[in-house]
Image (tube, rainbow, N blue to C red):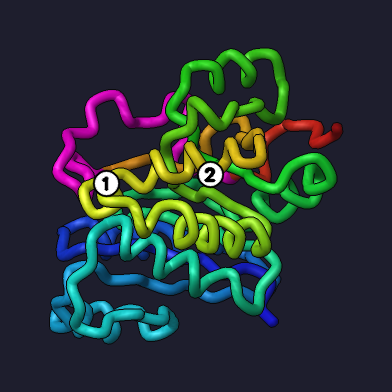
Amino acid sequence: MVTWRIGLTCMNRPYLERSLVSLLNNGLRGFKESYSVELFDGSGKTEYFDEVKKKFPMVTVHCDGKSRTVLGNNLRMWQTLHEGCSYVMVFPDDFVTCLDLLQYASKFVNAYKVLYDVFSFYTPFQEICEQWKKKRPYFRWLPQTFYGGIALTMKSHVVKQCAEWVIKNMCSLPQFTKQKEWDIVLNQFFQKPYRTICAAVPNLCQHTGVVSTIGNAWNGRTAPCFIGEDKSAMQLNMNLSI
């Protein structure tokens, strides 16, 4: 069993290579626990991943030639990733990370796993900066205000529960085929039961895309207080205590 399964939802967009380089070279630097990095394609264009497989042979690609909606692709990822691991960390295909993200994420999750099931290392709210000024290591992100999904990390049983909840409560609804944002699905799921997200302070990842996978402009979706790609999360002077 691997300790962490890391998944990226992908479309045929020009961001993926930069994201993988940042994750593999920066985010996973020095990480000693077992993990996998897995890509989930929604475009159905298998040739898009030919070069990816050559450049990143350590990455598992889930691409069967079938086109999927953003929701369908995310659901497939969540159905897959919960198996055989302790924690799941998910990304879109357009992000960068600081140095040593996974080292710090593991330390952070272990510090707060008694109280929380869901963790975030990218939170696009100014409150993160306010908490950082006060040297507080995390921000309590209420589920009804949730949107995001960059380095969103969960215990594996939560990922399984979410996939099952979506299949039971949403897939049969007519609006599910029209619904585009997976964030909104998670917003509803995290409120059933009520799950507060434990958001790390400061931000350790940043969004890089100009347009989202569903075509929305990303105005205001960059994370404040991102420490930068050249800074190590392990150098943060944070007291990770309850």
Q: Residue at x 22, y 56 (%)?
A: 15
List the residue tagged with mark 1.
Answer: 175
Q: Quadrant of the N terminus?
A: bottom right
Q: Residue at x 26, y 51 (%)?
A: 174
Q: Tell me if residue 218 is in the magenta stretch.
A: yes
Amino acid type, label 2: Phe
List the residue tagged with mark 2.
Answer: 189
- Residue 162 position within the rendered picture, expressed as x and y whole percent measured from the top left: 55, 56
Amino acid type, label 1: Gln
Q: How many marks?
A: 2
The answer to whether residue 137 is visible is yes
Q: Residue at x 28, y 63 (%)?
A: 10
Q: Which mark is residue 186?
A: none
Q: Residue at x 49, y 39 (%)?
A: 188
- Residue 59: quadrant of the picture: bottom left
Magenta stretch in the rendered image: 209-232
Q: Main secondary structure of the magenta part?
A: loop
Depth check, front residue: 82 or 27: 82
Relative to 200, is 221 on the left or the right?
left
